[in-house]
Image (cartoon, coloured by chain):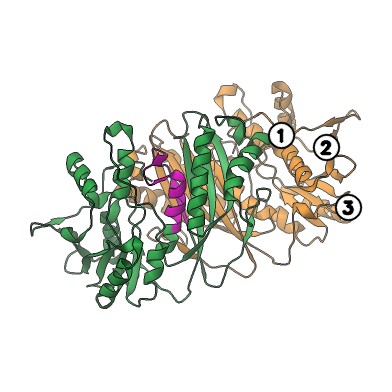
Chain colours: A green, B orange
């Protein structure tokens, strides 16, 4: 492709759009199922429940330490399938490209998306591109829909959670939120912290054999506190979290203290929160800690039917209620 | 929901986002499979090939005579499944909402999307919403991914097209492009023309039993001329189209003459182009004309291996080559 910048003609259904799709999207994402001349594609699927999920991505800046909007669009959707107990298989991809975006940036991001998909063993089987006018898009937005297959005998869900169940987290929280924030010039801060954005399927797969596994979720927008509130709302049961048990990296803690953020509300993009029966909690922790993705895993709390709140037991021995997120600590981090 | 305008807090993963989803999206789109508390959903599917497709929508204005971005997001994706020979079953929905959008407009559009989905007999089973900053979105963008089921014995495709096959169109072309254009104040024109945006599944289903059915496509971006070029590129065979046979409504013709547009390059959102064997072409035409959606159907041309071009036989008895679309006659019409 000879053009240096995306123009409206790249979205018009004609030759320029065909060139854009051929030289960037189809080139990086090539796989036996992707046919840019067909309207729909047949999915080869193995036996099991066919699971579907979808997610939109508007992160700013488009590239940040540890990832970019391309790799994030893969991990975000793959992870939603993984925490539901499925094996991720296929993705569809929508790109909303702003007129004026550098073609080199788009090429780099789609290449990154393709690498992430390959690492996650998912194929991008269908896609669509739209070009919007300058000033009507933040450079590039993606939407990805994921299809996976889940064992029909597997039952996970908020409705399986019982009083006394343990809450585990697979690693430090808040890295993604702070890494993206530090990549924004507006904050005037610099840091070497990497986003935790990653494929969580190795973590979720490792727990599927445990009969005491009740529920898994990736703590993205709204962080671990928002997952706790989702559990509370769906189960009608309170939770207790131990502040000292929740892993937080030092640079995340420092930035949060400096700017008044609470790391428990910040997004992760490569962590899993799991609810596990008391009998299986230690086994689950052990399984996770043996994986590179779970070496910092921890048991961080439990379901407590004696309260209807999300209670944080502080490091000083006190208690405070973790309220549901209202205002927006860090917009546009995913 | 009490707010009159969308704010960034409606995208932050907390209480405001939950309210937005509950009071607008979940309320209108409610169906037994849609569970806003789950990460992924299991799809009940009947036997057959599982087909998937995806499409993005950025039409301006958001509402136009005959439809809006909500109904369009359903019809566009349902139609891609339909022309591939599938029965549309499920949709996923991504919304990119610009800060400042009127809540009443969003509510009206999601209600319209829900009505279109119901009429097409598809369920929206998963969704995601993102809010982008004022000036970083055109009010509202949608991406929809569709899943359908296709008879395993059905084989349609560009590779099945043979020399001499007939080309049919199910109705007048260009209505959608011109209706959207007239809805834009910038053109200073007014008209009562309605978009043709509609579900084409009744049209595609009606032809599936014909052994001579080779290929179907909906002529959206780039119009019927671009479908002709897709056929030419994939088959390596030229086409002849008879100008006088291609149905064009009078108001579309008038606006095109006034502004210098060619209706054959303008988008339809409720038409089907079908390639059918010579033996079955008249039957196909008859089948379509008996349907309300196909009463103006016509045989408009044929595959002609003696040329490598898309040739238009003009009303005056001449010939001209319909070139592949390069510049953008009407951006943002889908």
**Which residue is label 2 attached to?**
B309
* Magenta-highlighted residues: A53-78
Q: Is residue B253 above or below residue A127?
A: above
Q: Which tag, 3 or 1, sits closer to the chain's start?
A: 1
* Front residue of this view, candidates B205 and A272: A272
Q: Chain of mark 3?
A: B
Earlier along the polypeptide chain: callout 3 or callout 2?
A: 3
Label 2, label 1: how far apart the Cα atoms are: 16 Å
Dot 3 falls on a residue whose secondary structure is: helix
Answer with mark 2 or mark 1, whichever residue precedes in sequence. Answer: 1
Please name the residue that numbered disc 3 is placed on. B278
Q: Which chain hosts label 1?
A: B
| Quadrant of residue B297 within the rendered picture | top right
Report the side of A279 relative to B295 (left or right): left
| Residue B14 visible from this viewpoint | no
Disc 3/disc 1 C-alpha distance (Å):
26 Å
- The residue tagged with tag 1: helix, strand or loop? helix
Mark 3–mark 2 distance (CA, rounded to whole Å)? 20 Å
Mark drawn on residue A108:
none
Regarding residue B91, the answer to whether it shows in the image is yes
Residue A324 in the image: state x and y as whole percent. Answer: 24, 52
A282 to A100, vertically: above or below? below
Name which residue lies at 39% across and 63% down.
A83
**Which percent across, then down, holds residue A280?**
28, 76
Q: Which residue is mark 1?
A: B265
């Amino acid at each position: 492709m000879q053009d240096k910048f995306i123009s409206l003609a790249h979205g018009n259904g004609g030759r320029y759009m065909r060139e854009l799709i051929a030289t960037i999207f189809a080139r990086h994402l090539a796989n036996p199922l992707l046919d840019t001349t067909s309207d729909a594609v047949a999915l080869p699927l193995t036996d099991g429940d066919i699971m579907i999920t979808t997610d939109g991505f508007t992160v700013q800046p488009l590239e940040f330490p540890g990832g970019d909007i391309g790799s994030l669009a893969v991990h975000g959707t793959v992870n939603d399938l993984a925490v539901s107990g499925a094996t991720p298989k296929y993705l569809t991809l929508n790109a909303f490209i702003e007129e004026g975006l550098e073609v080199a940036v788009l090429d780099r991001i789609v290449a990154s998306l393709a690498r992430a998909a390959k690492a996650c063993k998912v194929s991008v089987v269908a896609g669509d591109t739209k070009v919007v006018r300058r000033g009507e898009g933040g450079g590039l937005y993606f939407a990805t829909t994921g299809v996976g297959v889940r064992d029909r005998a597997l039952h996970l869900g908020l409705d399986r959670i019982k009083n006394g169940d343990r809450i585990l987290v697979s690693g430090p929280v808040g890295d993604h939120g702070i890494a993206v924030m530090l990549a924004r010039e507006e904050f005037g801060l610099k840091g070497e912290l990497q986003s935790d954005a990653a494929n969580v399927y190795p973590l979720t797969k490792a727990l599927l054999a445990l009969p005491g596994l009740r529920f898994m979720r990736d703590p993205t927008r709204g962080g671990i506190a928002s997952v706790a509130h989702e559990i509370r709302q769906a189960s009608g049961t309170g939770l207790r979290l131990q502040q000292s048990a929740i892993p937080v990296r030092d640079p995340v803690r420092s930035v949060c203290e400096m700017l008044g953020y609470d790391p428990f509300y910040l997004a992760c993009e490569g962590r899993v929160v799991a609810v596990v029966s008391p009998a299986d909690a230690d086994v689950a922790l052990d399984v996770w800690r043996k994986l590179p993705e779970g070496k910092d895993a921890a048991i961080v709390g439990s379901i407590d039917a004696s309260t209807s709140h999300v209670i944080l037991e502080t490091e000083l021995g006190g208690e405070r209620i973790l309220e549901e997120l209202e205002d927006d600590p860090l917009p546009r981090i995913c």
